[in-house]
Image: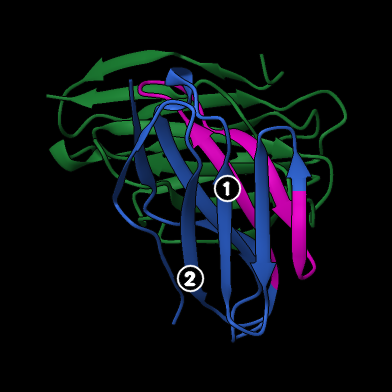
Chain colours: A blue, B green
Amino acid sequence: GQSLEQPSEVTAVEGAIVQINCTYQTSGFYGLSWYQQHDGGAPTFLSYNGLDGLEETGRFSSFLSRSDSYGYLLLQELQMKDSASYFCAVRDRPDSGGYQKVTFGTGTKLQVIP
Amino acid sequence: DSGVTQTPKHLITATGQRVTLRCSPRSGDLSVYWYQQSLDQGLQFLIQYYNGEERAKGNILERFSAQQFPDLHSELNLSSLELGDSALYFCASSVGELSGELFFGEGSRLTVL
């Protein structure tokens, strides 16, 4: 089967650093993406890791370890506007073959407090 | 603005009815994806098309169907609607089949009464 696990909620203080973890079980893994979604809004792409290591984009960084089936999103210098849901998403190919698809985790609701 | 256009933005209908949701991908994108998001839930993958052909299928109900037309726009048809079908339906697009970045539309909010 296929599964992605993320914490359901995280609370952090403005200006701090927060890490949102994602573990996955899947076959034919190709890459891990992260998306941000504000309440009532559309998901927006943050980062993609196809290879092991750290990808940095401004205040956001994402890490992947394929051997551990694990990744995380790191948000630095938190701002109030970072309060949103964050989803990890796996691109994989099912055991039975066929084409790749993109499956989303259940999301982590981040609340940034003053 | 992601460049992905979805219509209608809001739709209210009754159980048993049929609706069609429309999606226009970003200019140049060949892949279209459909996702369902129920209240406070994650994004459930429904189906993916690439250049007019179905590529991957998720947990899409038999009452639901979709297609991608030669001009690359896509439609998601939902029939025999039930209360549980009330959700936000997102369309996303990407340049290729293997892109790690999806661009999402603003969604179509369906309410079934």
- Residue B89, x across and y down, in percent: 42, 33
**Residue designated by label 1:** A74
Helix, strand or loop at disc 2?
A: strand
**Residue designated by label 2:** A23
Type of secondary structure dominating the magenta stretch: strand
Q: Is residue A81 left or right of residue B50?
A: left
- Residue B35, x across and y down, in percent: 47, 43
What amino acid does circle 2 point to? Thr
Boundaries of the magenta span:
A30-55
Q: Is residue B17 above or below residue A20?
A: above
In front here: A29 or A101? A29
- Residue A30, x across and y down, in percent: 73, 70
Crowd rating for badge 2 (residues with CA inside 10 Å; few <14, some 14–19, many 20+): some
For this orientation, the residue located farthest to the right is B28
Quarter location, residue B70:
top right
Residue at 44%, 82% in the rendered image: A1
Co-location on one chain, circles 2 and 1: yes
Instruction: State how far apart marks 2 and 1 are (Cα).
Output: 15 Å
Visible in this render: residue B23? yes
Q: Is residue A86 magenta?
A: no
- Residue A103, x across and y down, in percent: 53, 59
What amino acid does circle 1 point to? Leu
- Given the image, what chain letter belongs to the residue carrying mark 1? A
